[in-house]
Amino acid sequence: MRWPLACGMVVVAIGAATSARAQLQAEGILEPVPGGQPTFCQPGVTHIIENQCAHYWFAIKSSTLDLTAFNQQFVHLEGLQTSDPECPTIDVQSISLATNSCQKEGFVEVFAGTNSCGQAFTHRIRNQCLGYQLNLTSSTIDLDAFVSRYAQVTGPTVGDQWGDCELLDVQQVTPLPPCSLESQNLQVHDEQNTWLDWSPPTAPYTWVGTYDVIRGFIPEPVVASDHIDLGFVVCLADGYASTSTQSGPRDSLDPLEGTAFFYLVRPQGFFGVGTYGYSQAGLERHPSEGDCP
């Protein structure tokens, strides 16, 4: 969003598009609700899906598909997450049988070590949206080529799936768009005494405690090898508990002629610290100086 101001100055707000409900993909064993009695807050829940490899589960319902045909089978499903963040439920749109091998999505990172079973790993994949991480190894794939990229990794689990020996032997890596753990619909108001408002993230878990708000300067941002360097920024609000700064803090400073300000918001919650967002190429934005602590 751009606002023309005096002397050719502009205020720039960088945000992300959003949808009403998050599209979600999940893999795991599809199980009927224990005892046949739904105990979840969403009406119509009949099943749960549990992925012991990635340690997540969701309540499941569908108004169009016969989920009972897939009872106790390892499946891949796609659907919309319900809008209630305190009861993450997938309204299934499509379901298919899948091979019983772990499929993960997340950021690939260098993370070398040895687990308690004596098995060596070289990398890990970490998904902030679903709150899991998994150690990786591969004798056939160059995992270094995917470091700092959001990807899906597929392969058999070796070691103990339930304990400290959990390890994925990667057979395939597929780059994906990044998980969107960023604030949405960022808007800038009042050219004289600027305030912002925004929406929470739409990732599978959306419980957010606070937000960090920063102001940056154009033309500071540059493209680095694996991220967007935002340059020097100013922390306007640290650990802010609202989705609007209308009641303060406001920003009355004007940029110098020929320059511009931009504003970004980063959520924090049970998932840890979120992100200031990504470029169209999937590179995450990072300030080099002045970030909120």
Image (cartoon, helix red, strand yellow):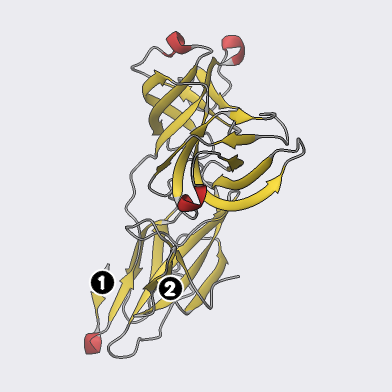
Q: Residue, x 58% and y 49% (percent of image)?
A: 271
Residue at 57% across / 13% down in the picture?
37
Residue closer to the observer: 90 or 179: 179
Q: Residues within 10 Å of mark 2 (few under 14, many from 20)?
A: many
Coordinates of residue 274 in the picture (x, y in percent):
52, 56
Viewer-nearest residue: 244 or 257: 257
Judge from the rendering whether residue 195 lies leftward or rightward of residue 53; answer left or right. left
Q: Quadrant of the N terminus?
A: bottom left
Q: What residue is disc 2 on? A: 230
Q: Position of residue 25 (x, y in %)?
A: 42, 33
Toward which corner of the image does residue 81 lie, by quadrant?
A: top left
**Residue 43 appears in the picture as rendered:** no
Per the image, the residue denoted by label 1 is 2
Q: Secondary structure at mark 1?
A: strand
Is 24 placed above or below 93 here? below
Amino acid found under the numbered disc labelled 2: Leu
Image coords of residue 223 (percent x, y): 38, 70
Q: Nearer the viewer, residue 229 or 218?
A: 229
Q: Position of residue 165 (x, y in %)?
A: 71, 35
Tell me where residue 40 sits by quadrant.
top right
Secondary structure beneath label 2: loop
Q: Residue at x 48, y 59 (%)?
A: 275
Q: Nearer the viewer, mark 2 or mark 1?
A: 2
Residue 239, picture quadrant: bottom right
Q: Are the residues flagged by discs 2 and 1 in contact, CB closer than 8 Å? A: no
Please tell me whether residue 102 is drawn above or below residue 73 in the rendered image: below
Q: Residue at x 25, y 74 (%)?
A: 3
**Can residue 168 be seen by looking at this rendering?**
yes
Amino acid type at circle 1 is Arg
